[in-house]
Amino acid sequence: MAKTVMARPGESIDPALVVPSDLASEGIRAIAEELRHLLADVFALYVKTKNFHWHVSGPHYRDYHLLLDEHGDQLFAMTDAIAERTRKIGEITLHSISDIASHQRLKDDNRPFVAPESMLAELREDNLALTKYLRATHEVCEKYNDVATASLIEVWIDETERRTWFLREIVGSRPP
């Protein structure tokens, strides 16, 4: 039997969107809220990574341009999996740019020029923060026995740590 769950405080999911789940309603709400923030952060990091990919310059242009393109592809691939996982547990996910903006914790960078080393250092810090958010979401999944979401998150932590490692090897541990 499908459970009626709350999409967000004060909002209920249209019955047409309810997906049956054996997870506790409380767990579904908690996990979905974490996933909405995670999705917003991944979208924000994706856009920032692509922004820097498009605007990088200097003697290492080709290497940085290709690296950031690879990182962007990896981040974009996460977005659909996060959103679909939210739906699989019977909740709703983000709907729009404003919805993303209201849930994101990572900061945008709208400066017209950023030096390449500063770009990479900023992305390193954002990936470090994303790893913390992923671990926190994993803890919520463990609390409510959502092994499927936890399993996906473990892969994303590994990917995020790899991005952080590559960026750290290029720019070291200097602050952005």
Image (cartoon, rainbow, N blue to C red):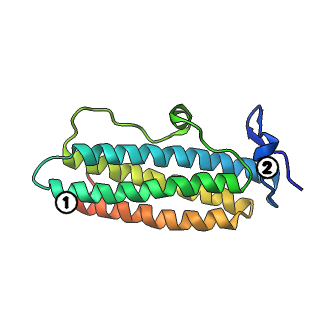
**Residue at point 31%, 56% (across, down):** 69
Horizontal placement of 129 versus 72: left or right?
right
Kindly identify the amino acid type of the residue bearing the numbered disc 1.
Asp
**Looking at this view, is 114 or 65 the one in front?**
65
Q: Which mark is residue 63?
A: 1
Check disc 2 and report its element: helix, strand or loop: helix
| Quadrant assignment, res 147 | bottom right
Quadrant of the rendering where the N terminus is positioned: bottom right
Residue found 51% across the figure and 39% down from its top: 104
Residue pointed to by mark 2: 26
In the image, what residue occupies the spot 77% across and 31% down? 10
Gap between marks 1 and 2, in whole Å? 46 Å
Q: Is residue 42 above or below residue 104?
A: below
- Up-down: is 52 above or below 69? above
Q: Amino acid at mark 2?
A: Glu
The location of residue 151, given as percent across then percent down, is 60, 68
Q: Residue at x 61, y 50 (%)?
A: 35
* Left-right relation of 161 to 102: left
